[in-house]
Image (tube, grey):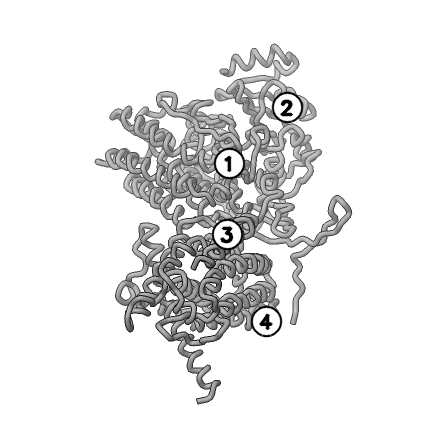
Amino acid sequence: MNIPELRDHLCAIHPDLCPLFSIEFGDGVLSVPCEKLYDAAADLRELGFDRLGMVTAVDHGTEFEMVYRLHSRSMSAAIFLKCGVSRDEPRVRSLVDLWPAALWQEREAYDMFGIEFEGHPDLRRILLPEGWEGFPLRKDYCDDRVVRRPDYI
Amino acid sequence: MSALAWGAVWGLAAGLVIALAALIGVWGERKVAGRIQMRIGPQELGPFGLLQTLSDTVKLVLKEDITPRAADVRVFRAAPLIVFAPIAMSFAVVPYAAGFVPLNTSVGLLFFMAVPAISVIGVLLAGWSSRNTYATIGGLRAAAQMISYELSRTLSILPFVLLAGSMRPLEVMDAWRWWWIPLTAIGFVVYLISSIAEVNRGPFDLPEAESELVAGYFADYSGIRWAIFMMAEYGGMVVAALFAAAFFFGGYLGLPGVLGPIALILKATAIVVLMIWVKWTFPRMRPDQLMKTAWKVLTPMALVQLVIVGAVIPWL
Amino acid sequence: MSVEIESRECVVRGDGGVVEQLVVNVGPSHPSTHGVCRVIVHLDGEVVTKAEPVIGYLHRGIEKMAENRTYLQVVPLTDRLDYVGSMYANWAYCRALERLAGIRVPERAEYLRVIVCEMQRIASHMMSLGSAAADSGAATMFIYAFDQRERIIELFEELCGARLTYNYVRPGGVSFDVPEGWVETALAFCRTHRAALTEMDRLYFGNVIARDRLKGVGVLSAADAVAWGASGPVARGSGVNFDLRKHDPYSVYPRFDFDVPTGSNGDCYDRARVRLFECYESCRILEQAIAQMEPGPFRTEGLPRLLAPRPGDAYDHIESARGSLGVYLVADGTPRPYRMKVRSPAFCNLALLPMLAEGHMLSDLVVILGSLDPVFGEVDR
C-alpha cells in the first residue's frame, strides 16, 4: 500500500486523525498531541499496524519530539507517529500495553533523554550504568568527559 | 625390599607412565582434532609437534598457583590429588602382558570399578571449595553424572566375571576366548559410552562445559593443579581404553613376547582415537538428557547383556 | 577462613514453600555471550527461573558521536555498529542519507551493494551458526562455518582492503568497483558454498544430540514475535513471513527470484535452520546479481564533500542478517546530522531472552542466546 492509499484508508476509518496526517520524505507521518498518543497508537494497531519498529526522541531545543515507527505486514505499509512533549516535564504514556516491544525501546529513550513513560513496568537505565547523571542525547548535556571535535572540516 | 619401597617404585613408574600417556594423549587429541577440523594441529615443536605438550606442561608448572581468597584452602589444594590418585591407582590392575599385572589381586575387576569412583569426591570437593557458582554447579553435575554412569559401567564388565568365574585379571585373561568379542559387543558399547561420561569428556563434558560453566569444577584452578586435573582426564581415558583393549578385545593374547603388549597398546590407541573422534564430532548433551541416557538406555542395555551372557553359560 | 557466598537467595514459591536459589552472573565476560552481554540468572537447581540481560557494556555512544561529525565521517562509525555485518549498517545509513539529500545511486552501485550484502549475510550467518554450535559444544561445526566465512572475508579484503570494518557503501555509491577476476572467484565460492552448507547441515542438524538440544527449546510464538518487534531469522523461525527484501522491496531486490525460508515451531532449531537456508537463497541472489550487473559508474560523481541536506527527517531500513536494521536521520541544514537513531534488530531480538529462557535449563540459556544471534556492537551502539 503506498502512502496516498494509506492516507485514504486512514481517513475513511478515523476521520479525526485525518487532518494530522502528512507526508515527509516519502513517509507517512501522523502528528498528534501527546495526550492523544496512546489512543492514536491503539487506533493504528486496530487498523493493522501490528509491529512497533522504533521508539525514539529528538531534542529540538524547545521540546522533545517523540518518534514512533509502526509497521503493518498485512498492508505492507509503515507510518510515523510523532508528538511534541515539553522539555520541562517530559512525560508520555507508555505503549507497553499495546506492544511489549516498547519495553526496552522506551527504557532506552528514558536512558538517553530522560523521558518518563507512564505505566512502564520497569523504567530503568538500560545502556548506561545505574547512577549515571544526566541524559546524554539531550543537546544541553555536558560532562567533563565530553570532547568536542574541532571545527576543521 | 620392604613393601613400602616396592610401593614407591611402582608409584613412580605409574606416575611416569601416566604423565607420558597424558603427554602423548594431548598431542594425539590435538592432531586428531586438527584432522577432523581441516587443520594441521601442532607442528612447530619437535618432530610432528610432539614436544608441544611438553612445552605446555613446562608453562603450566611455572605458572602461578592461584588460590581464591574465598576458597576453602586445604580442601581446594587437596582436591586435584583426590581426583588424580584413584585414576593412577586403577592402572595397577590392567593385565599388560602374559603373567604380568602390577597388582594381582583377587578382586581386580572390582578394584577397577570401585577405585576410580573415589575421584568423584575430589571433583565435588573441587567444585564446592572454590566458592564459585560455576564451580559449584559443575561439581554437582559431575557428582550426579559420574555416579549414574558408574552403575552401567560396572554392569557392562560383569559378563567377564560370569564367563571366567573370577575377578582376578590374569585368570580372566587365561579364560578369554575369541568368541567373547561378539558375545560382549553390547557390553562394549555401554562400557565405551559410560567411560567417556566417567572421565567427563565430550559429549558428556557437562561438569566442565566450556560454553556454559566456563570450566566448571576447575574454573578457579591454575598452573600445576589445573594440569593435574587434565592428567586425570587423559589418564582416565587411557586406562579405560587399556582396560577395554585387554578384556573386550583380548589384549596381549595370541602374540608372543613383546608383541603382546604392543598389540594391547595399539588396540587401546584405536579406542582412544574413537573417543577423541566422538568428542570432536558431537555437541554436548543437556543434564536431563544425560541422566535419561544413563538410566533409561545404558543401564537396561547392560542388563540385557548380562542376561545374554547368563543364558549362554549353561551351554559352555 | 571462609567467606559466605552471596549468590544465593530464598524465594517463596506459589505453594508457600521456600526454595533456595542460586544466582549466577553469566558474563559480561563469558565464552558464550557472543560479546559482552551479562545475564543475571536465577537458578532453581539447573532450571532458570529468571534471566535478566544487562546490556550496555559496549555502549560507545555512536548516536551522540554522529551528531559531532559530518555526514561522510559518520559512515566509518556505522561499521562499528554491527561488526559482524558492517556492510548493512553502511548501507542503511547511506539509504537514509540518500533519501534525505536526494542523492541518486547508479545502477551498478546498487548491484554491488546487493552483492556485498548477500555475501555479508552468508558470512554473518556462518558466524552465527558456528558460534551457536560451539555454544552447544560442537567445536567442529564452528571451524567448518568459520572456514566459509573466511573465504568471504578474503573476497571483501580484495574488494575494499578491510576484513571487518569495510566502509564500503558510501553515500551515492560504493567506494571501489570490483577488481579483475573478483566476480569469477565469487561465483566459484557460491558453488563450493552450497556443498559446504549441505555438509554442515548433515554434520550438525543431522546429529541426534544437536536435534535434542535445539528442538522445543526457547519456543517463540508467531504472535509474540510480532508483538515484541522481532525481525530477521528470529521472527521467520516462528513462521512470521517478514523480510524487507520481499515486503518493502528496496534497491534492485524486486529483480531477483528468491524465497524467504520460514520455520514453523519457533524454537532454536527453526531459527538456526532458517539461517542455513537463507545462505542458499543468498547464493541464488548473488548469482543472479552478478549475471545481471552491467558496466557503468559505481558512484555518483560530483557530490559535494560536505553534504548539508535541507532540514527534515528520514528513515530507511534494510534487511540485515539479524533483521530490519533502520537508520533515522534528522537534519537541520548544517553539515552534521542533528540526530541519528539506529533501529537495531539485535536490540529488539535480545529483549525476548527473559521470556524465552524462563523454565529452561542453564545449558539451554546459552543455546537460546546464541539462536537470537545478538551482536553487541549493535545492541549497545
Chain ID at mark 4? B
Which percent across, then down, holds residue B217? 54, 61
Q: Which amino acid does label 1 sit on?
A: Ser
Which percent across, then down, holds residue B94? 42, 70
Residue situated in front as seen by the camera: A135 or B35: B35
Q: Which amino acid does label 2 sit on?
A: Ala
Crowd rating for badge 3 (residues with CA inside 10 Å; few <14, some 14–19, many 20+): some
Q: Circle 3 — which element?
A: helix
How far is the residue under mark 3 from the one under mark 4? 41 Å
Q: Mark 3 points at which residue?
A: B304
Quarter location, residue C284? top left
Q: Circle 1 — which element?
A: loop
Q: Circle 4 — which element?
A: helix
**Image: B258 above or below A68:** below
Chain ID at mark 1? C
Q: Name the residue under label 2.
A: A41
How far is the residue under mark 2 from the one under mark 3? 66 Å
Q: Mark 4 points at which residue?
A: B75
Residue situated in front as seen by the camera: C377 or A28: C377
Q: Which of marks 3 and 1 is in front?
A: 3
**Which residue: 66% across, 25% down?**
A37
**Which residue: 64% across, 20% down?**
A43
How far is the residue under mark 4 from the one under mark 2? 62 Å
Q: Which amino acid does label 4 sit on?
A: Val
Task: Assess whether mark 2 and mark 4 are in contact (beta carbons under 8 angstroms).
Answer: no
Q: What residue type is labelled 3?
A: Val
Q: Mark 1 points at which residue?
A: C344
**Same chain shared by disc 2 and disc 1:** no
Q: Nearer the viewer, mark 2 or mark 3?
A: 3
Crowd rating for badge 2 (residues with CA inside 10 Å; few <14, some 14–19, many 20+): many
Task: Assess whether mark 1 and mark 3 are in contact (beta carbons under 8 angstroms).
Answer: no
Name the residue furthest right.
C16
